[in-house]
Each structure stands twice: as C-alpha cells, then as structure tokens.
Image: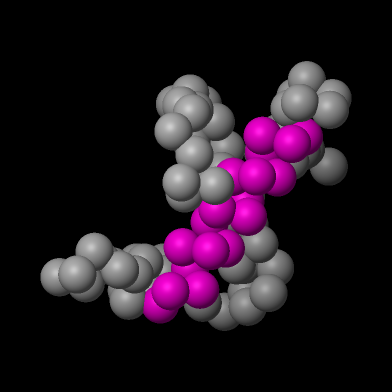
Amino acid sequence: MTEDSGKITIEQAYLAAYEYLLRRWEYMPERLIADELSDMSLLPDGGSADPACKNEFVEALRTVLDTEAKSGRYSRADQQLN
C-alpha cells in the first residue's frame, strides 16, 4: 500500500492511527506513548526506527479502508459507554 498513489481523507488517516494504536495496546497494554513514538521515529534514511511499526500501520490503514469499502463505515473508534 505504501506504493499506492491514491489519496486518503484526513478522517481515514485519523481512523488508521486509532486502529494502529488500538492494536498495539491490545498486544502490549503496558506500552507508553513515548515507546510508540520512539519506535515510529524516522531514521536519517527515512526508515522507521522499528520497521515493523510502519508495516503494522499500513495494515491498520488497510483495515479502515477495507471496512469502509465493505460496510461504508469503520466503527471501532466509536465511543462506547457502558
């Protein structure tokens, strides 16, 4: 998907970031935002400090776009009150 020249909306980018962070939290709930930012930092060559982060973000973006294409709406970011 990183080669795709298509554009996404600001809302889709926001939802992809939400999906990415939600997945990271589900995998490792004790991680701090500073850890995430460190992993996502870009190196002088443009690569991610943790290359898996970029791939995981692209997967999150695909989830948002695929969900919107199938059901018209990504809803995992909806606030849930119990």
Residue 7 in the image: above or below residue 35:
above
Q: Residue 58 colored magenta?
A: yes
* Residues drawn in magenta: 50-67
Q: State the predominant SS element of the stretch in magenta.
A: helix
Which residue occupies 19% across, 70% down? 45
Q: How many marks?
A: 0
Tell me if 42 is positioned left or right of 12 in this view.
left
Q: Residue 8 colored magenta?
A: no
Q: Position of residue 47 (x, y in %)?
A: 30, 68
Tell me if 14 is positioned left or right of 48 in this view.
right
Which quadrant of the rendered structure holds the C terminus?
top right
Q: In terms of depth relative to the viewer, which is nearer, 24 or 46?
A: 46
Which residue occupies 77% across, 34% down? 67
Q: Residue 39, can we see it?
A: yes
Which residue occupies 68% across, 74% down? 27
In which quadrant of the rendered view does residue 66 lie? top right
Q: Position of residue 40 (x, y in %)?
A: 36, 66
